[in-house]
Image (tube, helix red, strand yellow):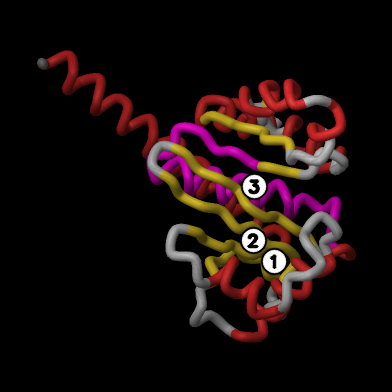
Amino acid sequence: MKNKVILCLSALLSILTFSNIFSSELQKITRKNDIEIVDVYSKSDKKIKDQIVKIFQNNSEYLDDFDDEKIKIILFKNMIAKTKVVIDKNKKVLGFTNYTFNPGAGFINYTAIALEHRRKGYGTLLNNAALQDLFDSGCKKVTRYSMRKNKIVHRFLKKRGYKKSFISFKLRLLGPLLYCFIPVGLQITKKDFEKNLSLQKK
């Protein structure tokens, strides 16, 4: 019994230490670049939400027939989903991510960066912030689906510790014609996230 208590306390201390290190690193980056990562809800600033909708619509991977209201319902009114954005000092939205909590598992649904602000590290910041939130909430694994043709996203995710899910391998059995139209599922565990985060700091 005593050993179990010690193990639980040790695990809790490890979680708190890692969370504090992540928060400290995030603060350094945001201060350096004069940006901020904030949560967006249905009652948040309309101007910020409108900018997110525009970025969503300009992202070629997402469906073209989503009107403004449908996008707002998906991003801001889903009770088990959350949206984070990177904004600059003028409240301009540079990018966003939307993710979902499920018992034991999490999903990153959408991530998009404004065209003029890509390749500046904002995608990595949002990915890390979403993963940290999901793992702190008890998720064991986090999955991100992306269309098979989007090789840029696949490279981005693999570089940050994601691996192809077992489901993606099984879907190959459907045959090449159907398989090419099915999104790729890439997953990451908390252990792989922590390992990749330490590599990013070097």
Tell me the element at label 3.
Answer: helix
Q: Which residue is mark 3?
A: 127
Image point 69% across, 66% down: which residue? 34
Instruction: Tell me which numbered mark, 3 or 2, is placed earlier along the sequence.
Output: 2
Using the numbered discs, state the Cα–Cα distance from disc 2 to disc 1 in whole angstroms: 5 Å
Q: Are marks 2 and 1 in contact (CB under 8 Å)?
A: yes
- Name the element at disc 1: loop
Name the residue rendered at 73%, 51% in the picture.
123
**Which element carries disc 2, helix, strand or loop?**
helix
Amino acid under disc 2 = Arg
| The C terminus, quarter of image | top right
Structural crowding at the residue carrying mark 2, measured as other residues with C-alpha within 10 Å and reported as few (<14), some (14–19) or many (≥20) = few
Give the mark nearer the N terminus: 3 vs 1.
1
Q: Position of residue 81 (x, y in %)?
A: 50, 59
Q: Quadrant of residue 58?
A: bottom right
Residue 31: numbered disc: 2
The kind of residue tagged 1 is Asp
Residue 141 horizontal side relative to residue 63, left or right: left
Q: Which residue is mark 1?
A: 34
Where 49 falls versus 20 (above or below)?
below
Give the class, few, some or many, for how many residues have Cα within 10 Å of label 1's Cα (few <14, many ≥20). few
Q: Determine if the magenta segment contains residue 120.
A: yes
**Proximity of marks 3 and 2: CB atoms separated by less than 8 Å:** no
